[in-house]
Image: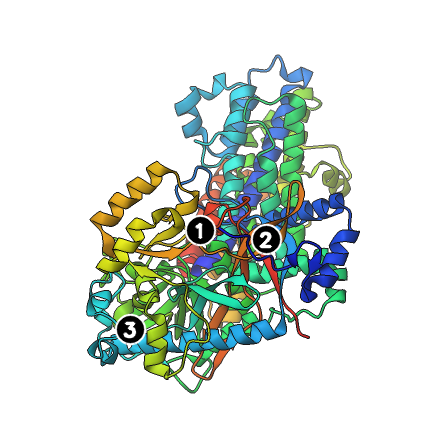
Amino acid sequence: MLSRTADNLYWLARYVERADCLARILDVSQRLAYTPVSQGSTANEWGSAVLTAGCADLFIERYGPLEDATEENVVSFLAFAPENPASIRNCFELARTNARSVRTALTTEMWDVINSAWIELRHFPNRAMTREELSRFLAFVKETSLRFDGATFRTMLRNDGYCFARSGVQIERSDNTARILDVKYHVLLPEKERVGGPLDYFQWSSILRSVSALTAFHWVYRDSVKPWLVADLLILNRQMPRSLASCYENLSRHLDEIAGAYGRQGPSQRLSRSILGRLTNCDIEDIFQNGLHEFITDFITDNNKLGKAITEQYLT
Amino acid sequence: MRQAFDEMSITDGQVRPAYETLRRWLDSVPHDVLDHRRKEAEYIFRRIGITFAVYGEENAQERLIPFDIVPRIITKNEWSTLSRGLEQRVKALNLYIRDVYGRREILKAGVVPKELVFNNPAFRPEMNGQKVPHDIHVHIAGIDIVRTDPDTFYVLEDNARTPSGVSYMLENREIMLRLFPELFAMHKVAPVEKYADDLLATLRSLSPRGGHEPNVVILTPGIFNSAYYEHSFLADKLGVDLVEGRDLFVKDEVVYMRTTEGPKRVDVIYRRLDDDFLDPLVFRTDSVLGVPGLMSAYRAGNVTLTNAVGTGVADDKAVYSYMPDIIRFYLGEEPLLPNVPTWRCREADHLKYVLEHLPELVVKEVHGSGGYGMLVGPAADKAQIESFRAKLIAHPDNFIAQPTLALSTCPTLVEKGLAPRHVDLRPFILSGSDKVRIVPGGLTRVAMKEGSLVVNSSQGGGTKDTWVLDT
């Protein structure tokens, strides 16, 4: 297939996934900010939302230090700001631009989701939203990514194009999970453990919520929320679709399928396998022992490297 | 201007036979039901994303062409006259272009003046003496047809470069089948969906390399082009790659495309890009849409471009006026489809007549298209006519003039109900190395404004489904 087509599919899927992640981040920040226990806390949840979204530099340039971030400017920055290339609105714009460029590689159903969302987006006001409007907006964004994934899963040919699209999703998703962990790793560290601290509990459960895993947690561990279990679920648990291990399992499979179809392995397959190996051959205690923060930082770097390798090997 | 011929009814109350069933059906369906279906059609068009852009307009990227749900009907007999005439015309166009870049017999014989070729901005000296694969230049033509009475179809314009609109022909039919299945049950309408197969067969027949399956691609300027939807639509229907200039490269006079599996050789390029932009090494050096080296591969005969380079030399409005002579010259036949009488302002006596009769004529720019830069005398005010007069006197070569034709009308759904609106027709003619293919029908364009004769979509024109009856 055309390299540009593969590139468009890959980025289309990434942008839809990114919009979804941003919506979750905003959702959780909103919930945390309204939790009574957080009122006395010094941590600024809105600031850490910007950090998690990975666009702190641009935000600081525009609105000043993260400590002073307010709900209003963070929501408008992450959801709508035209000058923020990674705002939800821009993700949808870019997703549609990519989709238009590869109309022929998309099924009608996939195109329909993207195009309808883009049309719908214009019905949401550009001004500051009421909380109710914001909730509706975030629900709409999440709904869109669900529909897009569903349309992809149900209608797309299982060919190289499918593998490139899904690889885009997995790269973006693991990046997002890793960044959530990166911003919040301090509340997961064992020395911070003060049993029953209500603020910590909210922090832990909010991490789970941001990857829609609160219910899953209880099913998997049959235990109350404990920080090392949260880390285990998000990093190593293969049953959890947003865990790093699960993302890499899928990613490696898709990349291997591409290599199989083309009859040639390359740097992206090797890199992906090596990262998956690291997520498979260790347990959460090893990770804590060697430093959770270092582990996550390394992962983010490697994940970016893999993104570059895929681009070089296939998409240019 | 006299009362225009309405294709449904000759006079009030008397319905032409081809339209009888449709008329009865229209009478039986309440207006609000029709209106509802019209809205449904619009919704579907927007959802599918069938949009086009008008250059220079704010938010231009996404506009819908108005779609009228009342079909336009052509009988089998009418179509057979039309299709024979179209085939004849395209054959002559091809022979003319081949001659102009070859032996130039027609110029030597003095049938067409030399200046019309050599002063034509669409003339490509790069093509002199250049043989093109299978000797065909215009593989895909769109010939615009208008009608003034039950028996007369005129050719209004030849489009021999990259005619667009065929996606509307196909999508209009799809929508009609979806919205009005009952109407199709009452009529025997010749299908148009074969166009995609025909086009692919035509393109494949043109491959410069024998012996294996040719790699056919469609070359688009990109998503900001006004006809991008059509490019992607056709690529999809044909099952070929839709490429942009940056997806292609030339090595040792062979064209390749960049794929995830490495370079892949390209045999036939259906390009929807003007000559000017094809190759920055030969034509416009600032073109970022083209492929450096493409012309070298083309001249080496390693790739087929459809349409060929330089076909514009045959389709401007000045050459148009010579088409009947061109047909006679190459084919030794009388034209089956007449031209609209045309005054060439480059000739002194013609210019004199035109200047004296401006209020009743339509004056067009020789190289204009899209309905821009024309004067419709009867609809213009004094100031417009005077400013046009000045332009004409300054650059007579740039203009031709025609009588204001009473274009036929078709009933069209407007706010107040059904009303007659002027229409034209653009059938698409495919010329492969094996044969000429024409699907029955074409794109009917309709001027949505009352009394307007301008059907171009850039000027607010709409489209209709065109039915050629099979009985």
Q: B425 and B207: which one is in front?
A: B425
Q: Chain of mark 2?
A: A
Residue beneath disc 2: A280
Q: Chain of mark 1?
A: B
Q: Residue at x 61, y 69 (%)?
A: B193
Residue beneath disc 1: B226
Distance from disc 2 to disc 1, alpha carbons, whole Å, reads 51 Å
Camera-near label (2 vs 1) is: 1
Determine which of the numbered discs, if any, sits on residue B297 in the image. Answer: 3
Camera-near label (2 vs 3) is: 3
Judge if badges 2 and 1 mark residues of a common chain.
no
Q: For mark 2, give the secondary structure.
A: helix
Q: Residue at x 60, y 23 (%)?
A: A129
Callout 2–callout 3 Cβ contact below 8 Å: no
The type of residue carrying mark 1 is: Ser
Image position of A19 (left or right of A35): left
